[in-house]
Amino acid sequence: MPVLLLVDGSSYLYRAFHALPDLRTSKGEPTGAIRGVLSMLRRLESDYKAEFRACVFDAKGKTFRDDWYPQYKANRPSMPDDLRAQVGPLHEAVKAEGWPLLCVDGVEADDVIGTLTRRALERGWEVVISTGDKDLTQLVRPGVRWVNTMSDEVLDEAGVAAKFGVPPALIVDYLALVGDTVDNVPGVEKCGPKTAVKWLTEYGTLDNLVANADKVGGKVGENLRKHLEFLPLGKRLVTVATDLALPIQLEDLPARDDDKAALRALYERFEFRGWLQAIDDAAKSDAGVDFAGKNDGLSPVSEPGAHRAGYESILDWSTFDRWLAKLEAADLVAFDTETTSLDQMAAKLVGMSFAIVEGEAAYLPLAHIYPAAPAQLPLAEVLAKLKPWLESDAHPKLGQNLKYDAHVLANHGLRLGGIAHDTLLQSYVLESDRPHDMDSLAKRHLGIDTIPYTAVCGKGVGQICFDQVAIERATEYAAEDADITLRLHRKLWPQLEAAPALAALYRDIEMPAMAVLFDMERTGVLIDAFLLAQQSEELGRRLMTLEREAHDLAGQPFNLGSPKQLGEILFGKLGLPVVKKTATGQPSTDEEVLAQLADDYPLPKLLLEHRGLSKLKSTYTDKLPRMVNAKTGRVHTSFSQAVAVTGRLASSEPNLQNIPIRTAEGRRIRAAFIAPRDHVIVSADYSQIELRIMAHLSSDARLLQSFAEGEDVHRATAAEIFGMTPGEVTSEQRRYAKVINFGLIYGMSAHGLAKNLGLERAAAAAYIDRYFARYPGVAAYMERTRSEARARGYVETVYGRRLYLPEIRASQAGRRQAAERAAINAPMQGTAADLIKKAMIATRRWLADAALRSRLVLQVHDELVLEVPRDELETVRATLPGLMTGIADLSVPLLVEVGHGENWDEAH
């Protein structure tokens, strides 16, 4: 079935111009839009193999919509001069790249795309429409997909419904209601997306809504009735035409070869040096100067260096078959992927590399798209032939951060089986305080300077994607990655084997945890985007109120986000005391300073609230809805194992571990993490885990007794410190004891405790003395730990994880004392991290063995979050606590608290 690929060139043009910085040639000619559009076209061409294609631009002058509505697009600013200067050269470049270019007078690009789409569907073709324009989602139907190259969104009918709340057939009705500010098409006043979706869900269509307009209540109902006269025209304006008489037929749009001479002239004029180099490299290859064009597909690397002598590229089936036989016979293969993106859920394969013997490696290019790239083996056929080996658990594989490679293969419908070793995790277990990237590891352990990524792809705004790298250069880089990974494993693995506790940590915790994290990342978590949008709007109003109140307190307007203006207001105009200064000698306005001043002055307190709410809005309520994956409808965070020296996991893009839970606003964000239909969210949280580990490590008799007997440990501590029975302890005394219990875990000094509790230092010191007198085992543990840390340079968790403390012998007292505090806390925090990983592994194994549909979706601090079908809830609630407490053999009992609800907040 033929595929027609249609690009909204005008959308590409504006998005590229505004997304990229002001790039120019040495003569001052602007180039950003040209570079951006060509890069997007190449990526699209790589992702979607199409027999027919066209890049469609808006023509100059008026269209038929201007005759219908003279105000159409009246508010749109004129095209910037720097953008106008790039349009002509871009049209030339698009045609030189082999794209048919369409620009039809009197109609918009959308209408050309709509008409070609209808014609292609009538012939039974498939259509891919690439644009950032939401209006074109109205064309989506079976056989038509909408693609946004900048966000990697791919929408079919279900995807459109998930994104907008209405199916493609109702997009025109939806747009007529909400309006289009870009095209100056007014919608119903105060009718946003949420209201439009609500109306269309209730009434089915715009026509039915209009027929029942008198039944719609409230102010927005009044606005609807006022707008009834314009709605038919509004709908007509936002409807994409599909019946134009075009001066071109589908047969006139075949994909063509590029014009290298024309491209070379354009690249030289606009100083696209990387692309010029790619053309030159390809020309050399075709002439037999370099290895990539050799008939046997083999390729000696041009760069000198003993460790790169045996690298080759795989460009024909005979070479592929030879390597496949070697892979199937090998005891261990170092495996790596080269991709289009660092986003693990969106990355697509550009190539793969393999190494079995040190000094010998191969690169299998699959999707390089630079001008004059040599023919490569077809991706689909290669993956079909490699699938049995890739998915086989009987063929061990080694990599550097294989979790990422597993995601890349999953994006192509493949499972990476046989994951045996990972050098990233080997390094992390051996030396948690050192960098674990492969370049650093190669330098540190092998004495080899590897080819950096920037040497291959460039850096900054001029960086190209790996699919635009010449294959001979890509082979040097990618094959080296596989070779170096193999060499590193043979250096690091013997060191782990020589330390049984570390080997067990790597084998029994870190490697199995990687598989759990892959599943969690792949599953993602469902969020209520409408609820977050509502919260964002409320936070915005609250921030505006706080800003006005701040201006009133200051007696003048000022920028709350400007440290300079803030300093002038606080310390200049208001005369507040200067707490500390910055490195440049200016009074500091950081959070610590504001917190100290907030005890006595209203403006700093207000500023702290403003900062907190602003961070919530920008980091979560505004950002999370934009991070919903178009294919899954979920948010997919990335969990990093090799970041925190304590062993704790780190969450990123988005970071779901730092959502504040002590404020109502923070808890409301958790309420937006929801369960799908017929499911609930289950939260399983270790209670006071680090205090219990403290009791185990210190073997303090009184602390062990408190936990063994199930006492309220804070109340018991207060009774010991204040010399009374637990029943006599007041809530304030219990609070003091709680601060002391947790403070000492973090090595808190008398000064820190005094500041935290608002006491005199002498009183705080007296409380600590009483604590240690009643809990001598804790005092002995702390002193023993400091001494061992100074002697060895590290401390250990219960499971042998080493936590290095490079500052423990520092001559500067402040740095040394900070290291001593870390020495006390690290074994507890590290053991807690080990325990939660063990709990994750055990939970995943149980869910699989029991054939349950429940899934782990998040791990945050000492908590596991699951998505559980309602009919499995009682089983999970009954089994999970015992499972999580049974994974440890400590001298104190562990306690797990389990809750459930429709969302994450309710589950607490």
Image (spheres, rainbow, N blue to C red):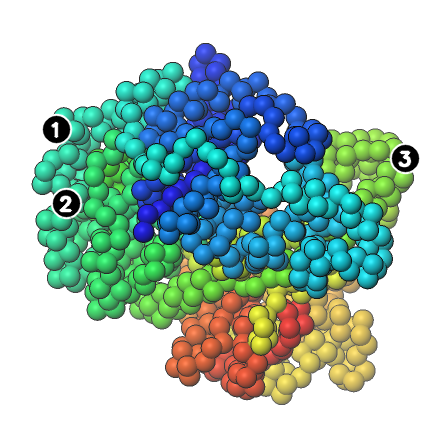
Q: Residue at x 32, y 61 (%)?
A: 414
Quarter of the C terminus within the rendering: bottom right
Residue nearer the viewer, 509 or 661:
661
Type of amino acid at the residue the image marks with label 2:
Asp
Residue 123 visible in rendering? yes
- Residue 15, given in percent of the width and then of the height, sits at 53, 34
Q: In this view, which residue lies farthest toward the top?
A: 27
Task: Relative to 374, say whether 437 is above or below.
Answer: below
Q: Residue at x 41, y 63 (%)?
A: 518
* Among the 4 quarters of the image, the one containing residue 133: top right
Task: Return the residue at label 1.
Answer: 288
Type of amino acid at the residue the image marks with label 1:
Gly
- Residue 889, given in percent of the width and then of the height, sits at 46, 81
Type of amino acid at the residue the image marks with label 3:
Gly
* First of labels 1, 3 by sequence position: 1
- Residue 576, given in percent of the width and then of the height, sits at 84, 38
* Among the 4 quarters of the image, the one containing residue 710: bottom right
Find out whether the residues at labels 1 and 2 contact each other: C-beta distance under 8 Å: no
* First of labels 1, 2 by sequence position: 1
Task: Return the residue at label 3.
Answer: 555
Q: Residue at x 9, y 41 (%)?
A: 296
Q: CA distance from mark 1 to mark 2?
A: 16 Å
Local packing at callout 2 (Cα closer than 10 Å; few below 14, some 14-19, many 20+) is some
